């Protein structure tokens, strides 16, 4: 199995062209998931959580990855 990308995940994007195209932002790149439909993929979670707004590693986080300031 080959590594397609490594980095922080963001919300998957979809667009309607002649068919629906699915892309997963991973770090600084987008992985095209459309050719992988129907295939088995593996995602490994490192246990790290980062703020969706500023990118810092918080002590605590709330819904949708936003850092608590307190």
Image: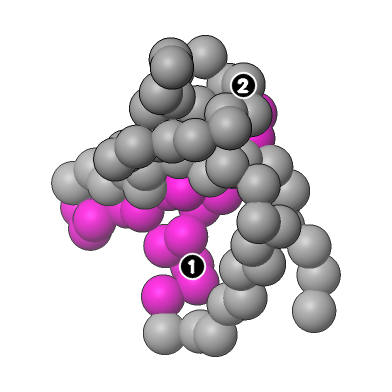
- 70 above or below 47? above
**Residue positioned 43% across, 48% down in the render:** 23
- SS assignment at label 2: loop
Can residue 30 be seen?
Answer: no
Q: How is the image coloured?
A: one colour
Q: Is residue 62 left or right of residue 58?
A: left
Q: For residue 21: magenta?
A: yes
Q: Nearer the viewer, residue 12 or 65?
A: 65
**Residue positioned 34% across, 37% down in the render:** 62
Q: Is residue 55 left or right of residue 13?
A: right
Q: Is residue 3 left or right of residue 59?
A: right
Q: Quadrant of residue 57?
A: top right
**Callout 1 touching callout 2 (CB < 8 Å):** no
Give the CA separation, mark 1 to mark 2: 32 Å
Give the image location of residue 54, x and y in percent: 52, 14
Q: For residue 35, which numbered disc appears in the image?
A: 1
- 24 above or below 36? above
Q: Quadrant of the N terminus?
A: bottom right
User: Which residue position holds label 2?
Assistant: 56
């Amino acid at each position: 199995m080959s590594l397609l990308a490594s980095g922080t995940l963001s919300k998957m994007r979809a667009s309607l062209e002649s068919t629906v195209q699915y892309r997963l932002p991973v770090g600084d790149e987008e992985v095209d998931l459309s050719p992988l439909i129907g295939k088995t993929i593996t995602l490994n979670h490192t246990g790290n959580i980062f703020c969706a707004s500023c990118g810092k590693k918080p002590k605590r986080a709330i819904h949708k990855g936003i850092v608590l300031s307190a």
